[in-house]
Structures are given as C-alpha cells and as structure tokens.
Image (spheres, rainbow, N blue to C red):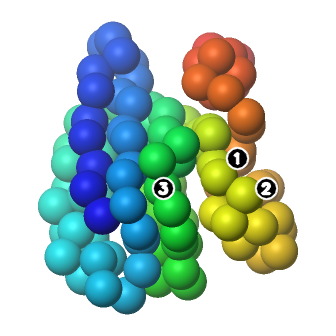
Amino acid sequence: MKYEVIELGPAANKVRLTGRLDSDTVGAVEIPFTATIASSGRSVLLDLTELEFMSSLGIRLLLSTSRVVRRRGGHFVMYGARPAVMDVLENLALDAVLPHVATEEEALAVLGA
C-alpha cells in the first residue's frame, strides 16, 4: 500500500490510498501513516478510489487514525470506495464510525458542515 498526502488548505488534507491495505502492508505503513495524519492537526479526506482491498488490519488502522484526528478536533471522511472495499465497510456497519460518501465533492461538503 502507498499513500499520498495532499494539502487542501489550512484545515484539511486529502490522503490517497493505493494498493492493498492488508496484513502484508499495514505493519510497514501504520506508524508513518498515523504520525503523518495526526501531526498535521487537520481534518482528513480519505480517497479510497485506488484502494483495491482492505482487511481487518486495514480497518483497525483507519479506525485508530480517525480517532486521533477527532481527538485533535478534526473530521475524518472517506470517499470513493471500490465495491470490494465498500462491501467490507457495509458488512461491518462502519459507516457510523468511518463516514463514507461517493465523491470527493460530497466529502468536501461533509467537512464543510
């Protein structure tokens, strides 16, 4: 898995995930990923359009990262999940904890609310 952080302004970053977020990749990215997002003190738009797969370890990483963002006063919203990733999110009923919308525009609107 790779991630890219794109500054959207003084209050938010877009984080684009690419590849697979699973047992083979979470260990390698967990600390730098969380540190990068948490240290910014900004809200996060998580772009899932290029994320091919997410396991339970990937979900744990996103849950812990979203908690850190919220503790620092930010918002955390995901968008653009592919069907395989969306199935995981829906089957575990995580949309209340990890909000997800279809498009970047909708995600920006959620952050603006």
**Point 37% across, 52% down: residue:** 18
- Along the line of sight, the residue nearer the viewer: 57 or 54: 54
- Give the amino acid type for the residue marked by disc 3 in the picture: Leu
Give me the residue at 29% from left, 77% from top: 25
Q: Does the residue at mark 2 contact the one at mark 1 (Cβ under 8 Å)?
A: yes
Above or below residue 71? Residue 111 is above
Q: Residue at x 25, y 41 (%)?
A: 4
- Which SS class for mark 3? strand
Q: Which residue is mark 1?
A: 99
| Amino acid, disc 1 | Pro
Front-most of residues 29 and 52 = 52
In the rendered structure, the answer to whether residue 71 lies left or right of residue 30 reads right
Q: Amino acid at mark 2?
A: Ala
Counting residues from the N terminus, which is met first, the one under dot 3 or under dot 2? 3
Label 3 to label 2: alpha-carbon separation:
20 Å
The N terminus lies in quadrant: bottom left
- The percent coordinates of residue 40 (x first, y second) are 24, 36
* Residue labelled with disc 3: 51
Q: Residues within 10 Å of mark 2 (few under 14, many from 20)?
A: few
Q: Which residue is mark 2?
A: 96
Tell me which numbered mark, 1 or 3, is placed earlier along the sequence: 3
